[in-house]
């Protein structure tokens, strides 16, 4: 095998609770994360020596600045591979949007390289390499539905909830995760227990979606609250910002309801993606143990 294409799914945070600041500069968080059916495509070929990465999105660096480059370099070093790799990324997931696109691309690259280079690494080993690249990367080895703790790197896989649909609404600008965390006021966060969202009906999940980062992003970009309102007006069972934003998701029980809401919101200046919450991870097949 000389070439492999891996589909890298987006994630949403059904619950994101910031518990406190740590001495290492990060924050302790509790998050319930869910993979959704919007994918980047990561094409990997054996080629030459070293790592080359091309990304088709204007705002994302090609080459060493891409998180996928760092992932590939780490895996090549670990597996002592004798050939190089060329990786091409087709971005469909909005960038710097709270949907974990870069982290997912990195996880997909690690998965694809594990097979292509016959590296034989386990899910835990791949997730460990991923944790060194970004705190959202390990989730993509434990999805489709998981609880994250610590800085986000301590994962507990959860049994998938009943099927549901998600309307992603991206208001068309980027946010910086670092900026949002720098501006959070921990005296104002609710210290919600994200476990409360797990194991129950879609309606229960939708009624309990939570994100401590939302007040920070929405203070700078009030459109976030407008999008939430619009989603609820269109029949969403619950709506919240994902990650550090600005993408907002609405939860729907049926595909029909989700697509109808997408149609009525698509007339505005927003990008809308009606997608299914995944009940299996597309990356599952690439781990060896
Ligand atoms: P998270 O939800 O995990 O905080 P995000 O979805 O908000 O992440 P990303 O889309 O992963 O953010 O992008 C964050 C930054 O990483 C961007 O500024 C982008 O230029 C950079 N980046 C590097 N490699 C990639 C990649 N493969 N895809 C997207 N962004 C990348």
Image (tube, rainbow, N blue to C red):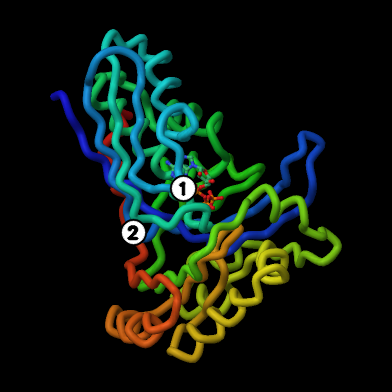
Q: Nearer the viewer, residue 158 or 44?
A: 44
Residue 51 image point, x, y percent: 35, 21
Residue under the image location 46 percent in, 34 percent down: 66
User: Looking at the image, which residue sits at the far right?
Assistant: 187
For this view, does 120 lie left or right of residue 45?
A: right
Give coordinates of residue 16: x percent, y percent.
62, 60
Q: Residues within 10 Å of mark 2 (few under 14, many from 20)?
A: many
In the image: residue 185, left or right of residue 37: right
User: Which of the pair 183/140 is nearer the observer?
Assistant: 183
Q: Nearer the viewer, residue 235 or 191?
A: 235
Left or right of residue 52, residue 242 in this image: right
Q: Quadrant of the C terminus?
A: top left
Viewer-side residue, 146 vs 200: 146
Please name the residue that numbered disc 2 is placed on.
38
Quarter of the view holding residue 226: bottom right
- Name the quarter where the N terminus is drawn: top left
Task: Inspect this view and state whether residue 14 appears.
Answer: no
Q: Residue at x 36, y 40 (%)?
A: 55
Helix, strand, or loop for circle 2? strand
22 up-or-down from 92: above or below = above
The residue lying at 41 percent from left, 44 percent from top is 104
Q: Position of residue 102 (x, y in %)?
A: 46, 44
x, y (%) of residue 216? 72, 64
33 on left or right of 176 = left
Residue 59: mark: 1
Which is in the foreground here, disc 2 or disc 1? 1
């Amino acid at each position: 095998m000389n070439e492999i294409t891996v589909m890298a799914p987006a994630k949403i945070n059904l619950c994101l609770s910031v518990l406190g600041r740590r001495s290492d500069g990060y924050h302790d968080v509790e998050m319930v994360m869910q993979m959704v059916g919007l994918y980047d495509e990561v094409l990997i070929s054996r080629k030459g020596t070293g790592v080359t990465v091309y990304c088709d999105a204007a705002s994302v660096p090609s080459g060493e600045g891409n998180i996928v480059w760092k992932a590939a370099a780490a895996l090549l070093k670990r597996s002592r591979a004798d050939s190089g790799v060329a990786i091409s990324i087709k971005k469909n997931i909005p960038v710097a949007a709270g949907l974990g696109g870069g982290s997912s691309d990195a996880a997909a690259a690690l998965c694809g390289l594990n097979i292509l280079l016959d590296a034989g690494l386990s899910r835990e080993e791949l997730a460990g390499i991923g944790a060194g690249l970004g705190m959202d990367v390990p989730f993509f080895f434990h999805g489709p539905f998981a609880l994250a703790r610590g800085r986000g790197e301590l994962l507990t896989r959860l049994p998938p909830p009943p099927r549901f649909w998600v309307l992603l609404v991206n208001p068309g600008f980027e946010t910086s995760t670092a900026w949002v965390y720098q501006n959070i006021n921990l005296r104002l966060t609710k210290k919600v227990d994200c476990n409360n969202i797990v194991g129950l009906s879609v309606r229960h999940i939708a009624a309990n979606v939570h994100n401590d980062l939302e007040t920070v992003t929405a203070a700078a970009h009030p459109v976030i609250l407008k999008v939430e309102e619009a989603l609820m007006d269109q029949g969403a069972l619950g709506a919240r910002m994902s990650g550090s934003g600005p993408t907002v998701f609405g939860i729907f029980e049926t595909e029909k309801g989700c697509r109808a809401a997408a149609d009525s919101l698509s007339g505005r200046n927003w990008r809308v993606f009606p997608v299914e919450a995944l009940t299996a991870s597309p990356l599952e097949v690439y781990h060896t143990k």
